[in-house]
Image (cartoon, rainbow, N blue to C red):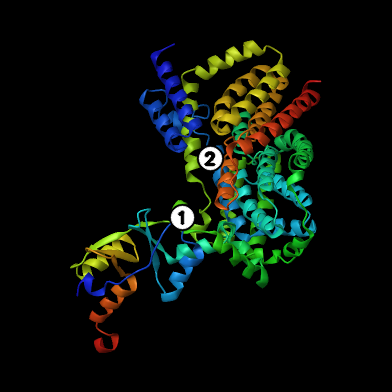
Amino acid sequence: MTIQIVLALVIFAAAYFFIATEKLPRVMVALFGAGLMVIIGATDDHGIFFSEESGIDWNVIFLLLGMMIIVGILQQSGVFEFLAIWAAKRAKGRPFVIMVMLVVITAVLSAFLDNVTTVLLIAPVTLLICDRLAVNPVPFLIAEVMSSNIGGAATLIGDPPNIIIASRGGLTFNDFVINMAPIIAILLVVFVGMCWLMFRKQLQYNPDRVERVMALNEREAIRDVPLLIKSLVVLVLVLSGFILHSVIHLEPAIVALLGAGLLVLLTRLETRKIFADVEWETLLFFAGLFIMVGSLVNLGVIEMVGKAATEAVGTNYFGAAAGLLFGSAIFSGIVDNIPYVATLAPLTNDLVQAGGPDAQPLWWALALGADLGGNASAIGASANVVVLGIAARNGHPISFWMFTKYGLIVTAVTVSLSLPYLWLRYFA
Amino acid sequence: MHASDIQSKFPVVGRETSAVEAARLIAKDGRPGLVIADKEGKPVAVVSAVDVLGLLVPPYVLDDMSLAGVFDENAAEEMWNHASEHTIGELLDNDRVRIYDLLTVDADATILEVAAQMADARTQVALVASEGEARFVTLPAVMDAILRFCTPESKKA
């Protein structure tokens, strides 16, 4: 092992430590780590900007950018708030029915929007509904963020790790829908049952308060009808573009960028509003991660580990899938699942390349483990942290352990149920 | 004219002051903000009137402005009952609210000096450095002083 490899591993491990412990801003750590990789000669400008194997994955960056612009504009229409209040009124103020409807709405939205955006949209309106009903909003908020993490796993664009997996594995939007959506639908039904078991005692029905929910006017939440129509049309076009990939041969990033461009053209919003929800820090964080992982690819570290993993796995791909599923869930519960998947994706790719179609399910094991593992603790996913912040700001603090207590149960059940799915679907 | 010529008393509130009391102090004389004291009662910071207004509104409505329209009149009026539950301390702990350090100006500072320092610090109230009871210069007082020296538009023509 050369000194350069040792240095690269030290930089990588240190960056992981600081990202996991959140002692420093993660974007700063990723970019600083990337800079150090350049300084030690582990990568260079050509490798960073132009290499498909070891450079920044522009497909991921621009798919995220395009979707952030589209969702940022769509959310200004107020359609999500409309949906939530409409659901609460249809449930006639019965807390558990409202919870089920909000859980399903959140999961479906999460499949098409990123999880943080989804909870930012659903949490305030949930607080409003709970305020009207005089019920504790904490069970609702916990249930929603968990359903967001579950629902996001269903599609290519639902969770950032899926975008990385799709790009590295050459997987399409339809591949995700066919392979991930069935188990996610099952897990969602199970999760609704778990919500009943975990939260039913906290959901007191108060008939006197029902009128206060029924008096809410959801139509007032829609602030801009033309904007809503244009945004929905573009979103449908973009989703069609993803689904018709095999026909139109456009990468998801290009489809998302074209959609974003069309929406900007149609809505003629101010530049400030168009880019208001673009998380530039997240995009730079991704870039920094890709450079660090790419450096390990350049130095042959990933190939070395990949070979060792391939030898260890042999042809026992179900064993590998189980290891990847549970290992990813545990790891993702402790640290951000984005750097984890950015590192594991090239390794998994080596295993899949070596094993051919028999090893293809390893991608789904990685995606399920990483996505569902985000529920395991309060810091397991960015959406969890965001909801805890909103809850505290509104006078309903959710402690780390309160969240984690429920999170561990939900993760254990959902990940455990994913294993028989993988077995029955791909290995039986 | 100097800072000491336009200084006046100004209400100083603490962490425990309720949002309703703070709102009353602002509404009474159309004050642009409030001065906040530390535990020892020493004036240390300024919060703007608009931030106190934000304290009266449920946080979830501020998080999602489209929710403000869904209440009917009765429900909207009922929402203000929550205001008494909030205190100025919440503003101090809120990362989204900018609390300005209290600017101190010399008693013999000219109006230009005072205006420049307040504009630079983006504050509506400044403490006048002097012995004894705290006195402040406020944005309306500074504006009023400036206007006395401005040539009216009609005379310019």
To which residue does mark 2 refer?
A61
The residue located at (58%, 17%) in the rendering is A306
Q: Position of residue A108 (x, y in %)?
A: 72, 46
Quarter holding the C terminus of chain A?
A: top right
Along the line of sight, which residue is nearer the eye, B55 or B97?
B55
Left/right placement of residue A353 relative to residue B95 reads right
Instruction: Find residue B140 and report its image quarter.
Output: bottom left
Q: Position of residue A136 (x, y in %)?
A: 68, 50
What is the spatial separation of the Cα atoms under label 1 and label 2, in whole angstroms?
41 Å
Along the line of sight, which residue is nearer the eye, A46 or B55?
B55
The residue located at (36%, 26%) in the rendering is A39
CA neighbours of label 1 inside 10 A, class few (<14), some (14 to 19), many (20+): some
Task: Specify the amino acid type for callout 2.
Answer: Ile
**Image label count:** 2
Q: Could you say which disc has been placed on residue B89 in the image?
A: 1
Q: Secondary structure at mark 1?
A: helix
Question: Comparing marks 1 and 2, which lies closer to the viewer?
Answer: 1
Where B96 sits versus A421, above or below? below
What chain does badge 2 belong to? A
Q: Secondary structure at mark 2?
A: helix
Task: Specify the amino acid type for callout 1.
Answer: Gly
Q: Position of residue A68 (x, y in %)?
A: 57, 48
The residue located at (63%, 19%) in the rendering is A351
The residue located at (68%, 11%) in the rendering is A314
Q: Answer yes or no: is residue A404 visible.
A: yes
Which residue sits furthest left?
Answer: B108
Left/right placement of residue B96 relative to residue A337 reads left
Q: Could you say which disc has been placed on residue B140 in the image?
A: none
Q: Answer yes or no: is residue A232 visible.
A: no
What chain does badge 1 belong to? B
CA neighbours of label 2 inside 10 A, class few (<14), some (14 to 19), many (20+): many
